[in-house]
Image (cartoon, grey):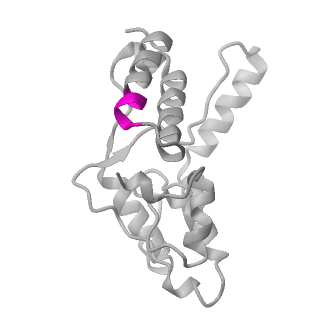
Amino acid sequence: QSVSYAPKGTNSATARQPFIDGKTAFLRDGPWVWGAVEKAPAEIKPQLKVAGLPFPVEPGGASNSLHIAAKVDAKKKEAVWKFIEMAATPEWQRAYGLTGSPAPRKNALSAADLTANPHLKIINDEAARAQNLFPSVPAVRAGYNDFATQVTKAAMRMISTQDPTARVLADLQRELERAVPL
């Protein structure tokens, strides 16, 4: 039912602008929204705050991970591993963490970093209590891109159409059974 209050065709990118303009009361989004908050009009910016979600389970999962292509020559594979090793160092994790997009690994930021950037403390506290919701079923993990795409399409359909939720979910179930057989 809450979807009925969202403007037709709204997605997360277009939903951010009314928030940044001070035209919506809240926005459920990720830590990357802070970059947009920083660009808010001067008269609105002091009113925009970051807060944790009031839910008992904070969803978490794979985000902005580093990958190696399945078929890559040995020289490129070695270079990719060196980059991943470098990106995983405390220095790089701290620099990444200071962007707030998203939270870095646990304990990457110092107390001074968090004092200087109060929004990062909230983001990091939320990340620390997040529970991994990445699927444990091997077939879903293997076909996760297809799975996530189908779920996203169904969510967008519920936001942007008047189709009954039960029909959207039934269609999603059929599509998931076809695309990601268990």
Task: Please check the rendered image and state whether residue 29 is part of the magenta-colored stretch, yes or no.
Answer: no
x%, y% of residue 42? 65, 88
Provide residue 141's location: percent of width, then percent of height.
43, 20
Query: What is the count of numbered marks?
Result: 0
Q: Looking at the image, which is closer to me, 168 or 62? A: 168
**Magenta span of residues:** 164-169
Name the residue located 62 percent from the left edge and 29 percent from the top edge. Answer: 67
Q: Quadrant of the C terminus?
A: top left
Does residue 4 appear in this view? yes
Main SS type for the magenta part?
Answer: helix
- The answer to whether 96 is drawn above or below residue 139 in the figure is below
| Nearer to me, 138 or 70 | 138
Q: Residue at x 60, y 50 (%)?
A: 9
Q: Position of residue 163 (x, y in %)?
A: 45, 37
Quick check: 111 left or right of 12?
left
Residue located 37% across and 23% down the image = 170
Residue 174 falls in image quadrant: top left
Where is residue 148 shown, x and y percent of the image? 49, 30
Q: Nearer the viewer, residue 96 or 43?
A: 43
Could you tell me if residue 110 is visible in this image?
Answer: no
